Amino acid sequence: MSPAASRRSSIDSMFTTASQFEPITLEDRIRITFEIANILQKQEFLRKLVKSLMLYGCPAHRLEYIMRHVSTTLGVDAEYVYMPNVMFMTVFDQGTHTTETHFIRQAQTFEMHKLGEVYRIEKLVAHGEVSVDEALVFIDSVAKEPPFYPRWLNPFVYGLASFCGCLIFFGGFWYDALIAAGLAMMFAIYEVFSGRIQSFQPIWEVTVCIIIGFVARAVTQYGFCFTPIAFSSFIVILPGYPMAVAVVELVSRQLVSGVVRMVYSIVYAFLLGYGIQMGSELYRTIDKDILEQETSECSRAADITTCDIQRIDQRFFFLLVPLFALAYCVFVKARPFRWPTMIVVSAVGYVVNYLLQCHAHAPAQVLQVVPAFAIGLLGNLLTKVTGKMSFDAVLLGVFYLVPGGLSIKAGYGMFTNDDSLGTQGASFALAMIESSIGITIGLFVATLVVYPKGSQHTPLMNF
């Protein structure tokens, strides 16, 4: 008899002997089947949970922490590695000494209402108040919910954000803001159509920036100012928030995703600045008679700060600041019942920044840390008191603080000799990073004050 046949017969006899002394009953078969089904169901829930968190805008540096916490609660031995738009989930089976790796890819968007619903079911699962079956049904129902805001509303949201941003952040006048709002609405329509052409998606931001730079330069001959119009027209895609998230990830020791996002944000800012400058120079090539020197008002607008005398009555800011927050509430798809909380928290961050800068004359480091600490503290207290997610309110406050406009001026300054934009190139990039570090420290200190020992049962959904 061959050795292989001998081994086979030995194995067969072993199973035969085992089956004689330990017969598998029908109850055992049913139990094993249910245990396997339960394990597979838990893995399916974890896959859908991480995909939902990535899709709806969960803070990137919290993803691995949240998933590990939920896995431990469910009794699943799993590890997670996050990279921008990609999550690697590896499940270990100690009984069979095998592993199973899932590659989950999902681009991040903002759906604050659905993120709040996912946070609610995640909290119930962590406390053991719902079964995995019920959680799966709930996540599927959230995913199938129709959009609350129609797509035709996007141009008006972009227009309102650009109108208010032009007046608040870029020193524009009323007619500058109207032109910026019109260009922003064109940008929103352009975004919809460009998404339908696969080969056009990599360059659509650059092409729309060329158009904006061209139009903004063309209208300067009629008394309009280039800087407020050009920079506020696409305020919704300014890379300040990704820059802040990159610094948060680096501080959280998530080096791979942090470095990738940091490099992307800097290159993206230079890309947009290149498009703006290219559009401007394209019009200068066509119209040789365009004035090289802007008016004194426009020159002042290029360097205007919060504490300078604005070109409009600053009492209008009491209306413009909430309107800007309202536009972003719709942009991140928050439901109307969340609007008051989000607007108040973001307005508090803006007011603290204004008071420190204009009345206390605080240094730059304090200006970056204290407002972020204020909105982070409010958000964490709201979560602790109400038990509901307040990440949407803090996110809106961060939108007021991130150095988006500064980053675009960095990209623009790389391709122009205009000294009015300040120090160019590397200095702007360093200023962007410094501001993001200040915001990160403020948010982390706020979390430390409210949750000094972390959360015992529910994973934190905040910065």
Image: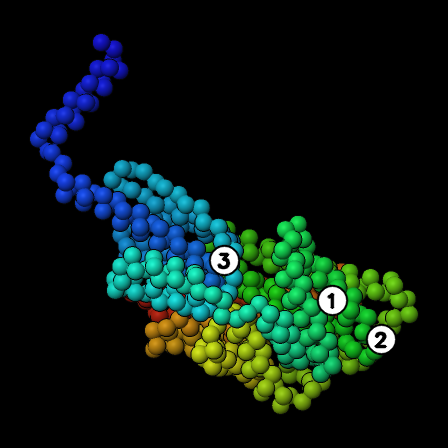
Percent of width and height locating residue 64: 40, 55
**The C terminus appears in which quarter of the rendering?**
bottom left
Percent of width and height locating residue 163: 66, 78
> At 78% from the left edge and 63% from the top edge, which residue is drawn?
279
Q: Neighbour class for label 3 at 10 Å: few (<14), some, many (≥20)?
A: some
- Circle 1: element type: helix
**What is the total number of numbered labels drawn onto the structure image?**
3
**Cβ atoms under marks 2 and 3 closer than 8 Å:** no
Which residue position holds label 1? 212
- Circle 3: element type: helix
Whichever of callouts 3 and 1 sits on the residue coming sooner in the sequence is 1
Question: Horizontal placement of 386 versus 171: left or right?
Answer: left
Q: Kindly indicate the quadrant of the structure image that contains residue 237.
A: bottom right
Whichever of callouts 2 and 3 sits on the residue coming sooner in the sequence is 2
Check the image and name the residue furthest to the right: 289
Percent of width and height locating residue 211: 75, 64
Q: CA distance from mark 2 to mark 3?
A: 45 Å
**The N terminus appears in which quarter of the rendering?**
top left
Q: CA distance from mark 2 to mark 1?
A: 15 Å
Which residue position holds label 2? 221
Q: Neighbour class for label 1 at 10 Å: few (<14), some, many (≥20)?
A: many
Relative to residue 106, is residue 363 depicted above or below?
Answer: below
Q: Kindly indicate the quadrant of the structure image that contains residue 402.
A: bottom right
Q: Amino acid at mark 3?
A: Leu
Which residue position holds label 3? 250
Q: Disc 3 vs disc 1: which is toward the camera?
A: 1
Relative to residue 17, is residue 258 depicted above or below?
Answer: below
> At 35% from the left edge and 51% from the top edge, which residue is drawn?
44
> At 55% from the left edge and 69% from the top edge, which residue is drawn?
150
